[in-house]
Structure formats: structure tokens, C-alpha cells
Amino acid sequence: MQERRFAHRFQKPGPAVLTHAHINQIATAVPEYEVHDYFLRFAAGSLAALPRQQKLFRRMADKAGIDSRYSCIEPADDPDGQIVDRSGIFRRGAFPGTAKRMDMYESAAADLAMLAIDRLEMDDMRTSITHLIVASCTGLSAPGLDLEIVHRAGLSPSVERTLIGFMGCYAAINALKVAHHIVRSEPSARVLVVNCELTTLHLKETDDLERLLTFCLWGDGCSAALVTGEATGIRLDRFKALLARDARDLMTWNVRDDGFDMVLSGQVPATIQAVLADNVAAILHGDGVDEIDLWAVHPGGRSVLDAVQRTLSLKPEALAPSRDVLRTYGNMSSATVMFVLERMLKDGAARAKGCGMAFGPGLTAETMTFGIAT
């Protein structure tokens, strides 16, 4: 009798019905100062005493596939002058230390984040936001950007906050992964995801060719996205993280006394190619490459996009959105792939299948599959 009374406790449960998370909206923003040509001239001038290196720099910069980039730093009139920015903070021979750069980040990041959030046009829904996820790897402070957003955006003081810091370019996929899990566990959740990066704050004085070429990829930018269980927009399906063995030194991001220091090895594209080639089936979760309609690839650089295209044998137009974002904005670290997804949210056909991927220190590849909701 007792066995019958308690038997129901041990019965195998039926299959759980989980809510799909969707990116309902994406808005993006960049600072007002377009700086690409200015920074190229500054970098070339740093190699004035090394004419062969200077010539090589100019040739490689011309092939980078970038026409414009934006910065929170207002450039001075002459990139060869003693003062690099109009405020006089970056002076040749006396560039600011990390503390000053963090002061600049604390001010400029909040302004840029609010510009993107305001473009979501959700004024009447801000108090309904239940969770806030902020990803950034270009600045640190406490109280931080997350609390500043809560205050300035008028979010509920009890909103649940998550910070994703110092992951680099792949942090956007991780932020979406966290939002995905939140919505699946709390179907009524309304998650605001913000990726804000001020990469150009870490401008350095150097005559190292590799570092100058790396810096000439970077731009500042921010994205804001609303993720909920409402079946509109981009449906988030499955995620897969990959880590290249014995490649941790190929891409690094370290805090130094003179700002943050990015090292990006020329071996990165080949390593990405090898990792993708060995893991295509795992990334696509059983689908074939020819079954994917949309490729939201983080444009870490032209050579990175070329490596992905070669490895997956993609048609040139498959990476057109990524190449367009690179050409227009450069590499904005974690925000960049969200700029690509913004285009797909606007232009993707209903029921289209997609694959997103971004790469960063480790060497790490974060990937996801998604679909355009009907």
C-alpha cells in the first residue's frame, strides 16, 4: 500500500516544453568622430624613421577592407602634430596612463550605451525589463556601466544584472547565450543586452608594425538588444564553444600601465581555419553548410573573413553583411557581430536558418545557430 502511495514521486516526467528565446529588436550606435584616415596617418607617421616598414604598413592598411571607423576621441587637426586629440590628453611622448583612460571610458561608454538603448524606442516598456546583461572588455569601473544604464534608462532598481567582461570579440555570443538561458528558465523575462566597446581609448605610441596594424582595425561602437520569449525576430537555437589548443598566445588582451594591450598574431586566420574545419558538424548541429542561409560572422578583419569563407566554401555574397560592417565601422570588439545581426533582423527572410560566430582571446570561437521567425 505504501509503495503505491509514493510511486508517483518516482515516475519519469514527460518532455519539458521550453520557451524559445528571440532577439526582438537590435539598435546600434557609434560616436560622432570618424577617425579612420586620421589614425592611419598617425600610425604611418610613427614609422617615419623606418621607411620600409612604413611602406609595408600603408600597403597592408590599404588591403584591410575598412573605409571608416568611429571614436570617442575627437582628433586634432594634424595627425603629425604634438597633440593627437583636440582635448590634449594624448600628447606625443606623454600619452595618458590607464587611470585616465578609464576616466574617459566611464564617461563616454554610458553616453554611447544610452544612444543605442534610446534607439530601441521602448520608453513605455523600460520598467518591464527584468534582466540587464552588459558586455564590455575596454573599460572597468565600479559602480559600473550596468548601474549607470539602470539609472539613466529608468530601469527597475531590482532588475537582475549580469556583467560579461574582458572576453573580447566573442562576448556578444556569450551575452546572447546567457539571455537565451534566462528566457528558457523564465519565459516572461525581458532581457536587455548591451555590448559597449571603446577600443580606440587604447591608442599607443609604438613603432611595432604588428601592433600598429592591429590598432588600425579598431573602432568604437555599441549595440542594444531586447531578448524575450515573444516569437518575433531572430530565434536563438543552439550554442557551441570551441577552444584552439596550444594557441592561447595568438590573441591576448592585457591591462598595462599605458592602457590595454592587444596582441593579434598573423597566425590567427590559419588557426581559425583549422578549428572550423575540424568542427563544422558540431557548430551546425547536424545541418550542412548548404542548409545555412545567413552567416553572421564577426568581422575581426578581412583575413579572418577570408579564412571562414575558404574553410566553409561559402559564396562571396554569404559574408557580405560582415564585410559591410567591417568596411563601415572596423572591428568594434564584442559589439561588431551585433551590427551584423541587426542587418539580418531587418533583411532576413522568414524561416531562414543562420549561423553566428565570433573569435577572441584563447583562441576561442563562440558559435550559435539561429532562425528568422515567421
Image: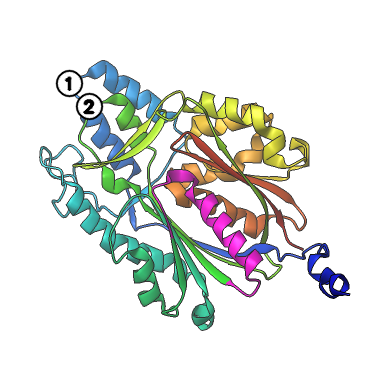
Measured Cα–Cα span from mark 1 to mark 2: 9 Å
Residue nearest the observer in this picture, 366 or 181? 181
Quick check: 140 left or right of 316? left
**Residue at 89% in and 75% down:** 1
Point out residue 310 in the picture as x, y percentages from the top left corner.
63, 27
Give neighbour class at mark 2: few <14, some 14-19, many 20+ (Cα, 10 Å): some
Q: Return the residue found at the far top.
A: 52
Residue at (22% x, 25% y) in the render: 47
Q: What element carries label 2?
A: loop
The amino acid type found where label 2 is placed reads Asp
Give the image location of residue 182, x and y in percent. 59, 65
Binning the other alpha carbons within 10 Å of mark 1 as few (below 14), some (14 to 19) or many (20 upward) gives few
Considering only vertical position in the picture, is 183 above or below 288? below
Residue 49 visible in the shown view: yes
Q: Do the residues labelled 1 and 2 touch (CB within 8 Å)?
A: yes
The image quarter containing residue 277 is top right
Q: Can residue 329 be seen in this view?
A: no
Name which residue lies at 61% across and 39% down.
319
Circle 1: residue type:
Ala
Residue bearing mark 2: 207
Compared with 226, 290 (above or below) is: above
